[in-house]
Image: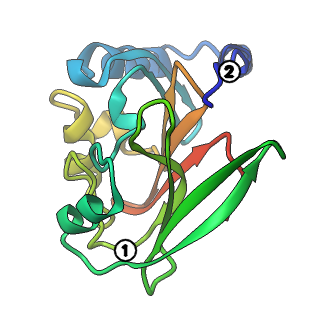
């Protein structure tokens, strides 16, 4: 059900065209690219104003909470209380999907479906502002910029990320995106976006 999205190439070309050839920006981009941790399989890095865009081939983008074949294991390993329900969703008016909805009292939410291809829980979308929700790599709302960048890059320095407010990890395979939003030095929000439009 996933689709390869060649529009990513167009998106990147627009970034590159719009961005002035500032040597400081180029140096920061090269620094992030060279120091990206190997497990995140980073293929490109672009900086535009306050947004760092990272193109990655990593499975982490698809399974930021780990791989689960059923809802019970996800709940057990998340170690927090989730409110939950099951809904139905028609994708492109042709495919009937069961949607497993999880939410917290602060309106953080995650929506999953069970893929017929992988037989695993796959993200539809999500929005996290709750500090108790922790990703597989220990990323969580409330952490500092330094600690966040340490998760993905080797020895990042403040001069590389001080001006960054948004970090977007985009899959180079299919349309799937993580958006990490900062307020000053603190991670305030994590969003998961895919081709599926559901809430």
Question: Where is residue 190 drawn, in percent x and y?
Answer: 45, 57
Q: Nearer the viewer, mark 2 or mark 1?
A: 2
Residue that appears at 26% across and 73% down: 132
The reply to whether residue 143 is visible in this rendering is no
Q: Quadrant of the N terminus?
A: top right
Image quarter of residue 140 = bottom left
Question: Where is residue 111 drawn, in percent x and y?
Answer: 52, 60
Q: Is residue 182 above or below residue 22?
A: below
* Nearer to us in this view, 57 or 46: 57
Q: Earlier in the sequence, mark 2 or mark 1?
A: 2
Residue that appears at 70% across and 22% down: 11
The reply to whether residue 20 is visible in this rendering is yes
Q: What is the tally of numbered marks visible in this picture?
A: 2
Q: Which residue is mark 1?
A: 130
- Residue 150 in the figure: left or right of residue 114: left
Q: CA distance from mark 2 to mark 1?
A: 31 Å
Q: Which mark is residue 5?
A: 2
Q: Which mark is residue 191?
A: none
Q: Is residue 195 above or below residue 7?
A: below
Q: Secondary structure at mark 1?
A: loop
Residue that appears at 28% across and 53% down: 135
- Residue 30 in the figure: left or right of residue 51: left
């Amino acid at each position: 059900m996933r689709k390869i999205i060649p529009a990513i190439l167009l998106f990147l070309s627009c970034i590159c065209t719009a961005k002035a050839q500032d040597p400081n920006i180029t140096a920061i981009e090269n620094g992030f690219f060279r120091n990206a941790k190997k497990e995140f399989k980073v293929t490109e890095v672009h900086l535009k104003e306050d947004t760092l865009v990272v193109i990655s081939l990593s499975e982490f983008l698809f399974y930021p909470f780990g791989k689960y074949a059923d809802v019970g294991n996800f709940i057990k390993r998340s170690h927090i209380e989730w409110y939950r329900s099951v809904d139905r969703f028609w994708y492109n008016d042709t495919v009937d999907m069961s949607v497993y909805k999880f939410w917290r009292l602060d309106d953080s939410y995650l929506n999953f479906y069970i893929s017929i291809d992988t037989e695993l829980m796959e993200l539809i979308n999500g929005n996290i502002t709750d500090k108790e929700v922790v990703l597989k790599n220990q990323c969580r709302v409330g952490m500092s910029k330094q600690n966040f960048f340490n998760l993905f890059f080797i020895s990042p320095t403040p001069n590389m990320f001080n001006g960054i407010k948004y970090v977007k990890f985009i899959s180079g395979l299919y349309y799937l995106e993580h958006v990490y939003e900062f307020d000053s030095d603190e991670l305030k929000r994590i969003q998961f976006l895919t081709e599926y439009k559901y809430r």
